Amino acid sequence: MTVCAIEPPSAGGADGVPRAGCAITADGAYAARLARDGDSWFPERWTLDGPEPYAVPLPGNQPEEPGTEVQPMGDGRVLIHRLVELRHAFALLYPTGPGTGELPLGAVECPEPGTRLTLLPPAPGGVRAYALAVGPRSSVVWLVAGGAFGPERLAEVPGRCSGGVWLDGAGRLLALDRELGGHTKTVVLDLERGEISPLLQITEGSVDRLLLADPDSGLLLISSDAPSPGQERLGWGVLGSTLPVRFPECLRVPECVVTPFAIQPEQVLVPENCAVGLRIDGAFGTWVGTWRPAERRVRHLPAPEGWLAGAGVWTREGLLRLPYATEEVPCGVAALTAPVEPVPESGAERVPEHVPPAAEPEPAVRTATRPVPLQQAPLGRLVTN
């Protein structure tokens, strides 16, 4: 029998995007991670929506393997994904006084050689959880928690898929980056109907991926090599907008990997004012960037010590909350603000010494009025600086 592979907690995804240090529910109430005690790994749940954050360890009868995945649910339980005797087993963990309770949910087997199975990002509502099994020729989306009778095979998508971004607040529309016929484009899977439709195609031959989306404002963070063939760049667009995708020069940090990880919610009708949290990885370490499309430049900030890199949530007021863990503070949340006031175009910005200055700002953004599918945004009007 052939087994799906799973990755250790620190590994990057198949698209090279760094994985976050923990998973956080869509509403920011709970987080979960695989914590380490010496050479042993165990699940840990964090409560983030109270007066003070606190962690609850959820160790099982034996240490977990490094590739074990965990994900918080909306009710505070933690979904765990283990490889057990050639099967992918799923269970819900919860604290029971001094011990850990465990509710088995069933298992998934992958018959095709070379298939990889991983959890998809936490779904809105926190009631259901999904996994993606990527095989040589097709990908399968599984409902692994929240169903009536254990893991349920929902839909098969031709091609090799990666990523996974929720486009609505109901957890129905899932965007996946699909590699098919030598081209990578983003498609949308309607989980209720099982229908697949195109979302993002800037040019026929470009590599286009959707990295992040905010259902409230429609702001999308995109990776594509359309403006610079062979070199992927970060851009932004608005779902249903007549404006083209834009690729600001300020999002290019030489010799660094820039990964968006959080968008400010509840900014309805003003996507250009949404604050975006960026993880920046370079030769000198990892730090935090904040950016708004309307501000035209990135603000570089030191990451808190022990940051669970790539994890964080925005509040509607513009506060970026970053979970961190150190020996002195095993469960902490640092708060960074993203000022709204305009940045002078000629003013100097305080950034780490190893970060190059931002390039020239891009033209102001106009709000569209006529909805149009994103894949029809004309590249001829593309603004790149």
Image (cartoon, helix red, strand yellow):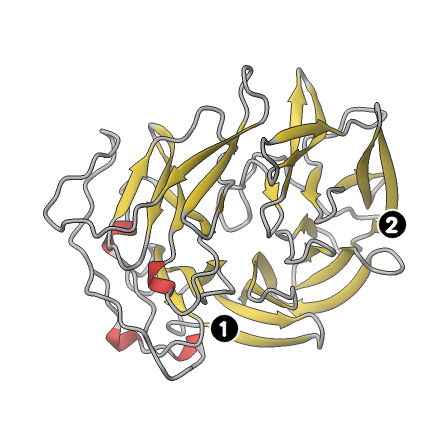
Q: Residue furthest left?
A: 346
- Let me know if residue 79 appears in the view: no
Kindly check if marks 1 and 2 are in contact, taking CB atoms under 8 A apart as contact: no
Residue identified by numbered label 2:
106
Which residue corresponds to the image point at 68% horizontal and 30% vertical from the top-left?
66
Q: Secondary structure at mark 2?
A: strand
The amino acid type found where label 2 is placed reads Gly
Image coords of residue 199 (percent x, y): 50, 73
Image coords of residue 70 (percent x, y): 70, 40
Q: Secondary structure at mark 1?
A: strand
Disc number for residue 161: none
Residue identified by numbered label 1:
199
Which residue corresponds to the image point at 59% horizontal and 60% vertical from the top-left?
161
Front one among 12 and 50: 50
Quarter location, residue 230: bottom left
Image coords of residue 346 (percent x, y): 10, 47
Q: As displayed, is residue 101 above or below residue 229?
A: above
Q: Earlier in the sequence, mark 1 or mark 2?
A: 2
